[in-house]
Image (cartoon, helix red, strand yellow):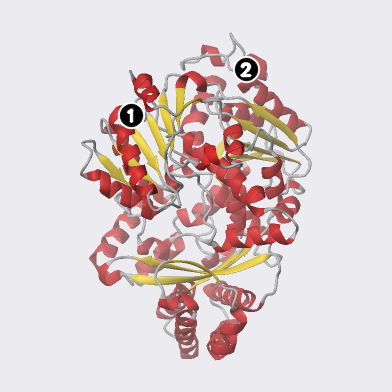
C-alpha cells in the first residue's frame, strides 16, 4: 500500500504561485503568465487528490515541470516522478528543485538511478584483497575508484569524470542486484544502495527515470524476488514525463534478455569467489567451467553466428532444437549441475546469490527456447563490442511482449491510485486514442494544453515541391541538393535528422566537400560532447539519427533549422514491429494506420520539437519526404503538427531569414 511521506510543508496555492503577481512572478527568472501552465497544474492536483489517472499533452514552452512538481509537493504524500532520460532527471533535481527551494524553502526530494550506477563497497574490498585486474588501465581505474570511495557520499559513478563509459572494471564493482548479498552483506549498513533507500523513504518526491521504474516494477512482479531486489519505495502516485516512451521501455523490462555475457560473468564471479576461498571444492570450479564452455557452444550455434550486427526474428526455434538440441540440453544441464553444487555449499554468503543467478539463467533459457506464449516475440540480436584485439561479438536471445497494455493496466494503473502521463507529444490528430490503447490506460481524464509559442510566426515549414519518393533511386541525389540549398540560406546552424545511420553517413560524406560549414556526425564523439561542440561552434551542422530526435534542447540562433529526410516510420523488418503489426492484422485491424502512422507522427513531432525552444527562437523546418503531400495518410501528420506557416517556395525560406 502507498506510504504517506512526512507532514507536508506549508505551500502556496497553485493560483498564489503561478498567477500574475504570484510567487513565481517575483522570482529572479523572466516571468510571463502562462494560462496553460496553471490549467495543467490544476488538472494534476485534481488527479492526485481525487485519486484519478490523467493523460496530458503540454506543448513545448508550457512549463510543465513546475506544473506537476508543485501539485505533487502539495499532496503531502510520496510521489514518484519518472522521466524518459537521465538528462531531464538531472535537470529536475539539479535545476528545477533548487529553483523551487529558493522560493519555498527546503524540500524533501531525492534522486535515484539504477543499481548499476552505484559502487558496491563489498566488491571493491574483495577485489582489493584479491586483485584480478587486466592491464595498466584497469589498475589505474581501480586506484582512482578506491580513492574516490573514501570521499563520496552517494557512490554514483557519474562523479568520476575520468572513468570511461565502457569501463569493463566498473561491471566488476557495481551494485546490481544479481550479485547482492542483501542484509547478509558485512557492508550492508554502509552500502550506497541502503543509503539511497533511506533517503527515498524520507522524501516527498522521488525522481527516477523510466528504465529504473520499470526495472523495479518487473523485479517486484516476480513472486520469488528477494525482499531487497527492488529499490523504489511505496508511493501514492506516479507522474511520467516524456510518457510517449512508456510502451517501448516497459516492453524491454517485462521481457527477457539472455546473452553470452551473462554466462561468462557468472563463471567469472564464481571463479573470483573460489580464489578468495582456496579451500572450496574443485567440483564447483569444474561445473563453472562447464557452464562457460557449454554456453559458448550454445550461443555460437544460434542462427546469427554467420552474420554481423543486427536483429532478426527467431521463429524457427523448433528447427533449431531439431538440429542443435544436444547443444541446448548441454547448456541447460550444465547450469542445473552448477546450481546443485552451489546448493550444497554451506557457510559462504556469496553462494546463495550465485545459485539464484544460475537458476535464473536456467529458467530464462528454458522459457526462451521452449515457451509458446502467444503474446511474446522471440528474436536474436548480434552486437559488436570493442575494437582491434579487444573486439568481440555478443549474441542476445530475447523475448519481448507484443502487447504490454494488459500488463500495464494490471501492474501500473491498478496498483497506483493516481498515474499522470505527460509529454509534448501524446496526441495524434488531437486525440489520445492511440497512446491510451498502447499503454492500457482505460479510465483517465484528458487534457491538451496548447504550446506557449506562436508557431505560425516563429517557425516556417518548408516542403520542397518536386522531391521523388524516398524509395526512388533518385531520392538521395535530390535530398543532397535540397539540403545544400537550405543550409546555404541558413548559413549552417542546423540539425539534419535521418531515419537510418547509412543514409545519414552517405549524405554527410557527400556534403563534407561541398559545404564550408563545420559538419558534426553522430558516432564520432559522445552525444553530450557533440551537442556541446554544436552549441559552441558558429554555423555548425549536426547530422544525427534517432538519439537526436528527442531529449535535446538547443536554444537561440545556434539551431535555426531542422531538416528531416523522410517520415520516421518504424523499420518494418524489426522483429518487434513485425510482431505488433501481425497481431493487429490478426485481430482484424489495419497495422499501417493503427500502429505505424501514429508512431511516426509522434516521432516527427519530437524531431520538429527540437527547433522552437523559447519565445525568442525562430527557424525553418524542412521535410524532404513528398509522401506528406501525396499520400492520404499525410493528412494525419499535418493535422497532428502545430500550426506552422507552410510553404513550397524556397524564396519564402530566403525571405524568412532576411
Counting every numbered tag in the picture gives 2
Nearer to us in this view, 67 or 487: 487
Query: What x and y, as percent, mark residue 139?
Result: 27, 64
Visible in this render: residue 231?
no
Q: Within the image, what quadrant is residue 559 found in?
A: top left
Nearer to us in this view, 96 or 85: 85
Q: Residue furthest top?
A: 21
Visible in this render: residue 520?
yes
Query: Residue, x 53% and y 28% (percent of image)?
Result: 60
Task: Residue under label 2, please give it.
Answer: 35
Query: What x and y, as percent, mark residue 144?
Result: 30, 55
- Residues under labels 2 and 1: Cα distance? 29 Å
Left or right: 66 in relation to 405: left
Query: What x and y, as percent, mark residue 100?
Result: 54, 25
Q: Within the image, what quadrant is residue 62 found in?
A: top right
Callout 1: SS: loop
Nearer to us in this view, 57 or 603: 603
Left or right: 483 in relation to 461: left
Query: What x and y, as percent, mark residue 173?
Result: 42, 62
Q: Is residue 533 above or below residue 410?
A: above
The crowd level at tag 1 (other Cα within 10 Å; few <14, some 14-19, many 20+) is many
The circle on residue 362 is none
Q: Is residue 643 above or below residue 638?
A: above
Going from N to C along the chain, the mark reached first, 2 or 1, is: 2
Query: Residue, x 41% and y 68% (percent of image)?
Result: 126
Which is in the foreground here, disc 2 or disc 1? Answer: 1
Query: Residue, x 49% and y 79% (percent of image)?
Result: 302
The circle on residue 558 is 1
Query: Residue, x 75% and y 49% (percent of image)?
Result: 415
Name the image quarter holding the C terminus.
top left
Amino acid at each position: 500500500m502507498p506510504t504517506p511521506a512526512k507532514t507536508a510543508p506549508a505551500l502556496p496555492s497553485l493560483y498564489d504561485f503561478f498567477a500574475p503577481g504570484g510567487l513565481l512572478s517575483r522570482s529572479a527568472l523572466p516571468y510571463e503568465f502562462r494560462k496553460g501552465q496553471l490549467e495543467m497544474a490544476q488538472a494534476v492536483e485534481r488527479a492526485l487528490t481525487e485519486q484519478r489517472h490523467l493523460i496530458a499533452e503540454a506543448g513545448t514552452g508550457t512549463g510543465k515541470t513546475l506544473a506537476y512538481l508543485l501539485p505533487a509537493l502539495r499532496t503531502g504524500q510520496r510521489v514518484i516522478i519518472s522521466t524518459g532520460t537521465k538528462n531531464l532527471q538531472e535537470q529536475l533535481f539539479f535545476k528545477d528543485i533548487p529553483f523551487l527551494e529558493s522560493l519555498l524553502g527546503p524540500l524533501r526530494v531525492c534522486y535515484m538511478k539504477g543499481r548499476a550506477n552505484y559502487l558496491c563497497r563489498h566488491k571493491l574490498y574483495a577485489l582489493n584483497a584479491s586483485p584480478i585486474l587486466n592491464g595498466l588501465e584497469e589498475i589505474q581505474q581501480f586506484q582512482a575508484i578506491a580513492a574516490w570511495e573514501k570521499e563520496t557520499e552517494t557512490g554514483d559513478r557519474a562523479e568520476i569524470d575520468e572513468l570511461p563509459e565502457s569501463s569493463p572494471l566498473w561491471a566488476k564493482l557495481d551494485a546490481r542486484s544479481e550479485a547482492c548479498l542483501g542484509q547478509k552483506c558485512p557492508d550492508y549498513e554502509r552500502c550506497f544502495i541502503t543509503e539511497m533507500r533511506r533517503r527515498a523513504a524520507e522524501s516527498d518526491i522521488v525522481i527516477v527515470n523510466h528504465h529504473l521504474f520499470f526495472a523495479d516494477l518487473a523485479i517486484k512482479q516476480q513472486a520469488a524476488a528477494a525482499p531487497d531486489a527492488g529499490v523504489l519505495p511505496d508511493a501514492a502516485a506516479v507522474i511520467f514525463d516524456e510518457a510517449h516512451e512508456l510502451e517501448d521501455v516497459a516492453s524491454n523490462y517485462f521481457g527477457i534478455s539472455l546473452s553470452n555475457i551473462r554466462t561468462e560473468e557468472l563463471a567469472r564471479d564464481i571463479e573470483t569467489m573460489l580464489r578468495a576461498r582456496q579451500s572450496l571444492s574443485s567440483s564447483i570450479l569444474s561445473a563453472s567451467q562447464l557452464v562457460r564452455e557449454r554456453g559458448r557452444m550454445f550461443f555460437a550455434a544460434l542462427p546469427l553466428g554467420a552474420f554481423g550486427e543486427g536483429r532478426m526474428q527467431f521463429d524457427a526455434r523448433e528447427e533449431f532444437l531439431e538440429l542443435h538440441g544436444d547443444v541446448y540440453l548441454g547448456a541447460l544441464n550444465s547450469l542445473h549441475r552448477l546450481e546443485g553444487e552451489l546448493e550444497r555449499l554451506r557457510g559462504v554468503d556469496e553462494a546463495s546469490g550465485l545459485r539464484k543467478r544460475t537458476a535464473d539463467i536456467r529458467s530464462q533459457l528454458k522459457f526462451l527456447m521452449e515457451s509458446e506464449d502467444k503474446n511474446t516475440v522471440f528474436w536474436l540480436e548480434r552486437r559488436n563490442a570493442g575494437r582491434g584485439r579487444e573486439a568481440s561479438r555478443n549474441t542476445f536471445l530475447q523475448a519481448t511482449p507484443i502487447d504490454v497494455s494488459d500488463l500495464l493496466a494490471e501492474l501500473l494503473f491498478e496498483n497506483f491510485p493516481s498515474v499522470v502521463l505527460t509529454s509534448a507529444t501524446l496526441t495524434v490528430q488531437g486525440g489520445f486514442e492511440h497512446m491510451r490503447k498502447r499503454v492500457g490506460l482505460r479510465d483517465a481524464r484528458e487534457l491538451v494544453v496548447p504550446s506557449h509559442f506562436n508557431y505560425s510566426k516563429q517557425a516556417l515549414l518548408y516542403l520542397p515541391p518536386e522531391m521523388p519518393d524516398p524509395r526512388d533511386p533518385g531520392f538521395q541525389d535530390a535530398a543532397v541538393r535540397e539540403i545544400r540549398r537550405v543550409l546555404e540560406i541558413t548559413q549552417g546552424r542546423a540539425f539534419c535528422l535521418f531515419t537510418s545511420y547509412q543514409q545519414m553517413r552517405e549524405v554527410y560524406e557527400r556534403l563534407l566537400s561541398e559545404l564550408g560549414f563545420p559538419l558534426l556526425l553522430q558516432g564520432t564523439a559522445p552525444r553530450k560532447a557533440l551537442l556541446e561542440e554544436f552549441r559552441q561552434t558558429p554555423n555548425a551542422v549536426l547530422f544525427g539519427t534517432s538519439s537526436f530526435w528527442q531529449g535535446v534542447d538547443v536554444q537561440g540562433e545556434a539551431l535555426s533549422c531542422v531538416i528531416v529526410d523522410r517520415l520516421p516510420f518504424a523499420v518494418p523488418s524489426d522483429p518487434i514491429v513485425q510482431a505488433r503489426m501481425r497481431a493487429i492484422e490478426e485481430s482484424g485491424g489495419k497495422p499501417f494506420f493503427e500502429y505505424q502512422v501514429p508512431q511516426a507522427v509522434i516521432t516527427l513531432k519530437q524531431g520538429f520539437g527540437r527547433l522552437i525552444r523559447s519565445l525568442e527562437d525562430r527557424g525553418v523546418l524542412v521535410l524532404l519526404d513528398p509522401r506528406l503531400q501525396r499520400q492520404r495518410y499525410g493528412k494525419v501528420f499535418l493535422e497532428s503538427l502545430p500550426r506552422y506557416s507552410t510553404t513550397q517556395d524556397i524564396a519564402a525560406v530566403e525571405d524568412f531569414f532576411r
